[in-house]
Image (cartoon, rainbow, N blue to C red):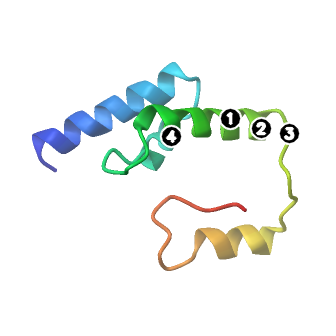
Amino acid sequence: MDKKDKQIKAMARMLVKQNGMPETWADRLDFDASKPVEDQMKDLAEEYKSIRDGDAQEERSTEDWAKLMNEEDNVGRVDLT
């Protein structure tokens, strides 16, 4: 990992921590995406609040979650819709 990557990871961890989210959510930010990081943070914050408050739209079985998380192309980001 080069210096730029380390700086990006550190910035991501700082942003999620400032927003009260688990540090592991930093991996969900994509600094190379066309969507601004600020907008990504807003989306993550809303998702985290919804999960924390128990407002999840859809109930999933253990099997559904396992399937989502074990998909071959899963890189820490799962579309829950």
4 or 3: tag closer to the N-terminus: 4
- Residue, far top: 18
Number of marks drawn:
4
Q: Which one is closest to the eye, mark 4 or mark 2?
A: 4
Q: Amino acid at mark 3?
A: Gly
Residue drawn at x 41%, y 39% as measured from the top left? 36
According to the picture, the residue beneath numbered tag 4 turns out to be: 40
Residue that mark 3 sits on: 54
Question: Judging from the image, what secondary structure is the residue with disc 3 in?
Answer: loop
Q: Which residue is mark 2?
A: 50
Identified at 40% across, 32% down, the residue is 13
The quarter of the image holding the C terminus is: bottom right
Q: Nearer the viewer, mark 3 or mark 2?
A: 2
Q: CA distance from mark 1 to mark 3?
A: 12 Å
Q: Amino acid at mark 4?
A: Gln
Helix, strand or loop under label 1: helix
Which quadrant holds residue 60? bottom right
Asked if the residue under mark 1 is in contact with the one under mark 4, i.e. CB atoms within 8 Å, the reply is no
Disc 4/disc 1 C-alpha distance (Å): 10 Å
Q: Which image quadrant for residue 44?
A: top right
Tell me how far mark 3 sits from mark 2, CA to CA: 6 Å
Whether residues under marks 2 and 1 lie with C-beta atoms below 8 angstroms apart, the answer is yes
Q: Residues within 10 Å of mark 4 (few under 14, many from 20)?
A: some
Q: CA distance from mark 2 to mark 1?
A: 6 Å
Front-most of residues 71 and 37: 37
Q: Which mark is residue 46?
A: 1
Q: Residues within 10 Å of mark 3 (few under 14, many from 20)?
A: few
Q: CA distance from mark 4 to mark 3?
A: 21 Å
Residue visible at 49% across and 80% down?
Answer: 72
Precedes in sequence: disc 1 or disc 3: 1
* Identity of the residue drawn at 16% across and 50% down: 1
